[in-house]
Amino acid sequence: MINLRKILKLEGKIHNKQKVHYILLLLSGIIIGALLLQSLNTFRTFSKEGQKTEVCMKRLQNKIALVTGGSCGIGSETAKMMAKEGAYVIVTDIQDEKGQELAKEIKGEYYHLDVSSDAEWKALAEIIKKKHGRLDILFNNAGIIGFNEALGPQDPENVSLESWHKIHSVNLDGVFLGCKYAIGLMKQNGGSIINMSSRSGIVGIPGAAAYASSKAAVRNHTKTVALYCAENKYNIRCNSLHPGAILTSLWDPMLGNDEVARNKVIAQIAGGVPLGHMGKPEDVAYAVIYLASDESKYVTGTELTQDGGILAGSTAGPKRD
Ligand SMILES: NC(=O)c1ccc[n+]([C@@H]2O[C@H](COP(=O)([O-])OP(=O)(O)OC[C@H]3O[C@@H](n4cnc5c(N)ncnc54)[C@H](O)[C@@H]3O)[C@@H](O)[C@H]2O)c1
């Protein structure tokens, strides 16, 4: 420690003028020290900025992602967002023309894949293994509700067994097969599987029994896959998504083609959503990006909802005037 008194007094041998010199010297020393500290801090800030640049690096940089049902709606929006975030995206669907166009746009590749076909999954897994050597992300997105596909009534009293099986084959078998083949492609390097369930996988839907049942099974299978992969130290995470009321072509049969009638139904649906409007495909895509990225490295077996608050509870609770 500098003994100021000692310096100032200097055993009484120093002249007043000299004392002033010493004080000035001391002050300039303090100022120079402060300036040095300041510049060190600036340097540190620069270093932090440097780290920030690293964090701001694209969130899926160098990852290879596969999206099923990627030709339209939520799948297509997610494929685009994944590509923007640096992933190489393999788009698959049964609507080949749209899928090919999208793959071209995002500089990825497209394959026809009916998710309910074991043979098609097997063949695609072999192609991916040969071409890329691995898979980092699988978005098991493809799904049907049964209305667009003219599968007849969907309520539990009238749905046909054939229709029930068809919907489960796409929504549930498709996810099961996707997980099965993805585990094989991911277990060397780890990865993230995101399974598309629905709010209907958590609550009952009187008008869409098979859909709700298949989505509930997806919700549960996700947890089984998550635990199995953890047990085997594969570093593969598996999570499910639970969107509700996302405006895509899935809703077309319920909305119809007439603009006025369509807007009326949309407003009716929006009235039942706590946030007051239907969601957009991007609202789900953002959640996929999070679950696909390393930001969610400690998240597995979980359920993430994108439903404007529908599942948060009934709006029929007591209200204040
Ligand atoms: N839109 C919503 O409100 C909502 C809510 C909850 C869950 N989801 C789920 O999100 C997923 C995507 O739905 P969306 O709203 O984008 O609907 P969408 O109809 O726009 O997209 C579904 C996609 O799946 C494809 N597909 C259908 N059968 C297939 C099969 N056998 N193999 C491969 N691809 C097939 C379709 O061609 C289409 O591209 C579905 O699983 C759906 O159940 C949607």
Image (spheres, grey):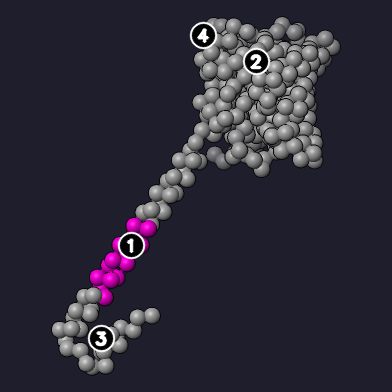
Residue at 44% over, 49% down: 48
Residue at 42% over, 46% down: 49
Q: On the image, numbered disc 1 is attached to which residue?
A: 36
Which amino acid is tagged 1?
Answer: Leu
User: Which of pointers 2 and 1 lies earlier in the amino acid sequence?
Assistant: 1
C-alpha span from label 1 to label 4: 68 Å
Q: Indicate which disc residue 92 carries.
A: 2
Which amino acid is tagged 3?
Answer: Leu
Q: Nearer the viewer, residue 48 or 29?
A: 29
C-alpha span from label 3 to label 2: 83 Å
User: Which of pointers 1 and 4 lies earlier in the amino acid sequence?
Assistant: 1
- Against 254, residue 181 (above or below) is below
Nearer to us of marks 2 and 4 is 2
Residue stretch rendered in magenta on the structure: 26-40
Horizontal and vertical percent position of residue 276? 54, 28
Decide if residue 88 is on the left or right side of residue 9.
right
SS label for mark 2: strand
Q: Indicate which disc residue 8 carries.
A: 3
User: Which of pointers 2 and 4 lies earlier in the amino acid sequence?
Assistant: 2
Q: On the image, numbered disc 4 is attached to which residue?
A: 259
Neighbours of disc 1 within 10 Å: few (<14), some (14-19), many (20+): few
Q: Which residue is at the far left? A: 17
Q: Which residue is at the far right? A: 161
Task: Look at the magenta stretch and give its main secondary structure.
Answer: helix
Nearer to us of marks 1 and 4 is 1
Horizontal and vertical percent position of residue 292? 62, 32
Which amino acid is tagged 2?
Answer: Thr
Q: Is mark 3 within 8 Å of ligand 1?
A: no
Magenta stretch: includes residue 289: no
Magenta stretch: includes residue 33: yes
One can see residue 199 in this view? no
Neighbours of disc 3 within 10 Å: few (<14), some (14-19), many (20+): some
